[in-house]
């Protein structure tokens, strides 16, 4: 049995290496643009692994105020590994337009591979744990690094598979049995034509939390063998006599949930709940002019509040009702298709 396992693993790694070389190493040379602001340069950190249960003290890295960085692993000095490293995209915090935003001050800890329970093949990725020590107690109690929109910082598996991170992919394939050439190929098939893969808009289950602003919701729902772009542009929009505006400014972490309202019994109806407000409380986007006073009078979007469902005031009524989306009312719409995919997995 041992020889069979070794032969199977060797074949898996051989297939993976060939896939990796074809997809990640045959494209253009890495960008030569220099970072702006923050600490200069593109440092490379040597760490032993990405397995939370196997991290050691020397795997701790300090990326405070860095614009970008890369990682390398032991036994990666051969020609192929060097080529992988040179072709790898750097890890960045986030972007403001086309400008890189530096990692926050006092950002030190451990890169690790995160895989949720019962995850889809395209789910999971690399996160950063702000832990003082790799010990189980310290690592388990420490928080992850978060982005300014309130979502965890991460490089998702679709990004790893489609955006040239061959050094990390190669390491994951050798450390984790669930990281395979088939899984990488699936991500490349699903996301190969997607111009921009943002970790914050990928939604895999109905109750998953995701960041929003109070203008337009735009997500990519990911299923077992398909993805669906979902846009809800008018949820936070008010209108009067053909004029449209957004009465609230701000951002939050939200999630969908099944309706438990008896009036929707037996139907696939979804609400949106504000989990928490990010930053300051949302405020009216209107000023104090007479026109804006009229806008406030006709505003039917209830102020978003943490812990509450998103509510609107229907025309002719004085009591606000939770926003409710009936999946089966127009099952062919992109929103219905996406929510149906999430409903199936919940």
Image (cartoon, grey):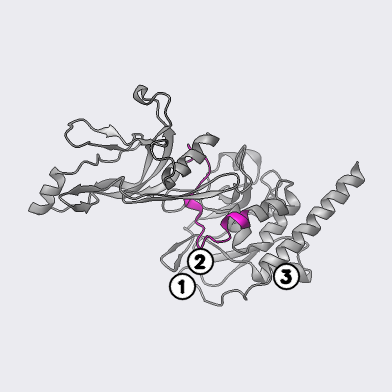
Q: Is residue 198 above or below residue 26?
A: above
Q: Are marks 2 and 1 in contact (CB under 8 Å)?
A: yes
Q: Which residue is mark 3?
A: 82
Q: Position of residue 234 (x, y in %)?
A: 30, 48
Q: Mark 1: which secondary structure? A: loop
Instruction: Look at 21% across and 41% down and name the residue there.
Output: 300
Q: Which mark is residue 102?
A: none
Q: Position of residue 155 (x, y in %)?
A: 56, 55
Is 308 left or right of 289, judged from the image as shown? right
| Marks 1/3: CA–CA distance | 26 Å
Q: Is residue 320 above or below residue 214?
A: above
Q: Quadrant of residue 252?
A: top left
The nearer-to-camera label among 3 and 2 is 3
The nearer-to-camera label among 1 and 3 is 3
Instruction: Look at 58% across and 60% down and name the residue there.
Output: 192
| Marks 2/1: CA–CA distance | 8 Å
Q: Which residue is mark 2?
A: 67
Within 10 Å of disc 1 (Cα), the crowding (few <14, some 14-19, many 20+) is few
Q: Which residue is mark 1?
A: 36
Tell me which segment is drawn in magenta: 187-208
């Amino acid at each position: 049995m041992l020889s069979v396992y070794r032969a199977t693993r060797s074949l898996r790694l051989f297939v993976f290496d060939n896939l990796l070389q074809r997809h990640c190493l045959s494209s253009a040379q890495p960008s030569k643009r220099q970072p702006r602001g923050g600490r200069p340069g593109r440092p490379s950190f040597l760490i032993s692994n990405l397995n939370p249960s196997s991290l050691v003290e020397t795997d701790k890295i300090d990326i405070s105020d860095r614009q970008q960085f890369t990682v390398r692993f032991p036994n990666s000095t051969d020609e192929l590994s060097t080529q992988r490293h040179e072709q790898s995209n750097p890890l960045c915090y986030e972007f403001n337009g086309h400008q890189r935003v530096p990692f926050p001050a006092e950002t030190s800890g451990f890169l690790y591979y995160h895989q949720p329970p019962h995850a889809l093949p395209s789910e999971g990725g690399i996160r950063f744990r702000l832990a003082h020590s790799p010990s189980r107690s310290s690592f388990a109690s420490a928080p992850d690094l978060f982005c300014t929109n309130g979502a965890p910082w991460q490089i998702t598996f679709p990004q790893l598979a489609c955006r040239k991170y061959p050094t990390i992919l190669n390491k994951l394939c050798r450390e984790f049995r669930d990281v395979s050439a088939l899984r990488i190929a699936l991500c490349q098939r699903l996301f190969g034509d997607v111009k921009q893969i943002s970790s914050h808009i990928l939604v895999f289950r109905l109750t998953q939390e995701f960041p929003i602003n109070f203008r337009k919701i735009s997500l990519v729902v990911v299923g077992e063998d398909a993805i669906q772009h979902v846009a809800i542009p008018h949820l936070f929009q008010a209108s009067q006599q053909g004029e449209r505006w957004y009465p609230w400014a701000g951002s939050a972490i939200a999630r969908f949930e099944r309706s438990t309202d008896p009036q929707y019994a037996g139907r696939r109806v979804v609400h949106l709940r504000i989990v928490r407000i990010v930053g300051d409380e949302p405020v009216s986007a209107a000023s104090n002019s007479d026109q804006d006073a009229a806008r406030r009078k006709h505003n039917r979007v209830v102020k978003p509040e943490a812990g509450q469902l998103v509510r609107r005031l229907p025309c002719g009524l004085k009591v606000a009702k939770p926003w409710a989306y009936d999946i089966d009312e127009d099952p062919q719409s992109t929103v219905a298709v996406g929510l149906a995919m999430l409903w199936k997995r919940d």
